[in-house]
Amino acid sequence: MNAQGWFRDALSLTKVRITAMAAVTCASGYGLRARGLDSGVWAVLAGTFLVAMAAAIWNEIGEADLDARMVRTAGRPIPAGRLHPATAGWIAAIVAGLGFSLLASAPKRPLWAIALAAFAMAYYNLVYTPLKRRTAFAVVPGALIGAIPPAIGWVAAGGGLGDPAVWLLGGYFFVWQVPHFWLLSLVHHDDYRRAGFPTLLDRFRPPQVARIVRAWVLATAVAAPLAAFGCGLPAWAVLALLLVSIALMVRGVSVVEAPTRAFRVINLHALGVALVFAIAA
């Protein structure tokens, strides 16, 4: 393999499109506490992004046997045999080290930022990843991962974890994480079944699954404007999130009929919420 191919495979381990969301949600917590984004945010975002990348690599190492069974993931570097797990482990260690180094330069409370990032990486790989093999409801405790990046941004800007605002913001991303994963499992249900991952459709009939996931989609829609109002965002921001939440209710409820569309819509909703919180405070 040439150097370009090796680098491309190494980068694909990091699940950039997914891990980038950790940086975006981190910005929401930082912006909320600092009342806007200042120059200190960039090291925090980069550090969070890199630690999320390292966590993703460790996840791919741990799930390589399952990835090999799924059409969607069989071509990934480790199950396809293009990268050895030990090599991937070294890449993860280097990326994590860079990430923690950047978080150490956070404007305020760098030790808290590092501790939260380390906890997220450990929890994702040592708790949530093994639990996914046992139950379709693993995502409920696993959704804690979605709430941590905003908290990293919050503490890096000087906030304390006892403040209700960070719990409201983190609560939105916790709620969002649940339908986000369940919709993904509906989109790729055959692959998940082939790999042995339990899904909601293994336990409930399609109409019941639709009701369960739809309830979480609606909860996500309601959580956004409530969090904005509770965190004291200006009226235009609360109104903007109310409108995008109404759009989510309208477009995101076709769970079983159109899970791909619902998955796309709920992720756009989360991106919009993160950006509004980052700039509106």
Image (cartoon, rainbow, N blue to C red):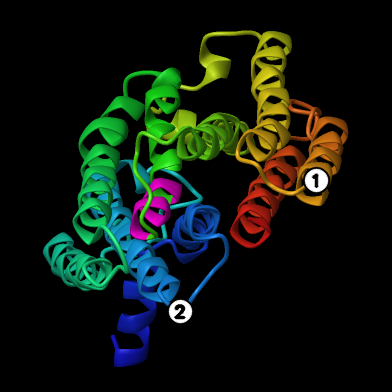
Between 136 and 26, the one nearer to me in the picture: 26
Q: How many marks?
A: 2
Look at mark 1 in the image and give the residue it sits on.
235
Point 47% across, 32% down: residue: 164
Mark 2 closeness class: few <14, some 14–19, many ≥20 residues within 10 Å:
few
Point 81% across, 44% down: residue: 244
Side of 105 relative to 135 (left or right): left
**Which mark sits nearer the N-terminus, 1 or 2?**
2
Please determine whether, in this image, residue 146 is positioned above or below residue 41.
above
Residue type pointed to by label 1 = Ala
Mark 1 closeness class: few <14, some 14–19, many ≥20 residues within 10 Å:
few
Look at mark 2 in the image and give the residue it sits on.
39
154 drawn magenta = yes
Instruction: Give me the C-alpha separation between circle 1 and circle 2.
Output: 26 Å
* Outermost residue, bottom side: 3
- Magenta residues span 150-156
Q: Quadrant of the N terminus?
A: bottom left
Residue 206, given in percent of the width and then of the height, sits at: 69, 14
